[in-house]
Amino acid sequence: MEFLNTIGGYAIALFGAGLAAFLACVGSAKGTGIAGEAAAGLAAEDPSKFGKALIIQVIPGTQGLYGFVIWFLAFGKLVPGMTVEQGMQVFSACLPIAIGGLLSAVAQGKVAAASINILAKKPDDWSKGMIFCIIVEFYAILSLLASFLMLNGLSF
């Protein structure tokens, strides 16, 4: 506890906000990279499918945006002289999107890569791949909602 008192609640809250943005963006970078590898292969073989492949590739990038939204909202809760308890509350509220964003973006990137394979083999069924991606997106949205509601419930 002495260590936490030394760094203070403000630093703890700031670290949580940073994790929300950082981890969600890392997941999005990894997820869009996974999907991008599949999209690049398809675009090399059939350039006419580039647009649809790009749409599928960008879907895992939303988690980074969600992390940034929570980072921004967490900054609204930062006040000089925050107690350690207040800092831990903000830190804890940032964890759902930090962890959920990281993991769901990577999983969604894998689903997006598989969806690009659908586009390659059956172009008329590419929307089915989008639905698979949206199912994973639901859990990213739940992570965003959990962090949002937790931050919104804080008052100090």
Image (tube, rainbow, N blue to C red):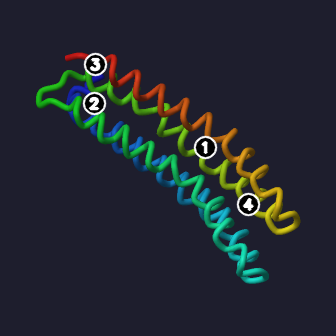
Which residue type carries mark 3? Answer: Glu
Q: x%, y% of residue 155? A: 24, 16
Q: Nearer the viewer, mark 4 or mark 3?
A: 4
C-alpha distance separating marks 3 and 1 = 27 Å
C-alpha distance separating marks 4 and 3 = 42 Å
Residue placed under numbered mark 3 in the picture: 85
Q: Nearer the viewer, mark 3 or mark 1?
A: 1
Disc number for residue 103: 1
Which residue type carries mark 1? Answer: Leu
Q: Secondary structure beneath disc 3?
A: helix
Does 152 sit above or below residue 49? Answer: above
Residue placed under numbered mark 2 in the picture: 3
Q: Residue at x 61, y 43 (%)?
A: 103
Cβ atoms at labels 3 and 1 below 8 Å apart: no
C-alpha distance separating marks 4 and 1 = 16 Å
Q: Is residue 100 left or right of residue 117?
A: left
Q: Is residue 56 left or right of residue 99?
A: right
**Which residue, as the protein is rendered here, is positioned at the far left?**
80
Residue placed under numbered mark 4 in the picture: 113
Asked where in the image residue 47 lies, by quadrant, the reply is bottom right
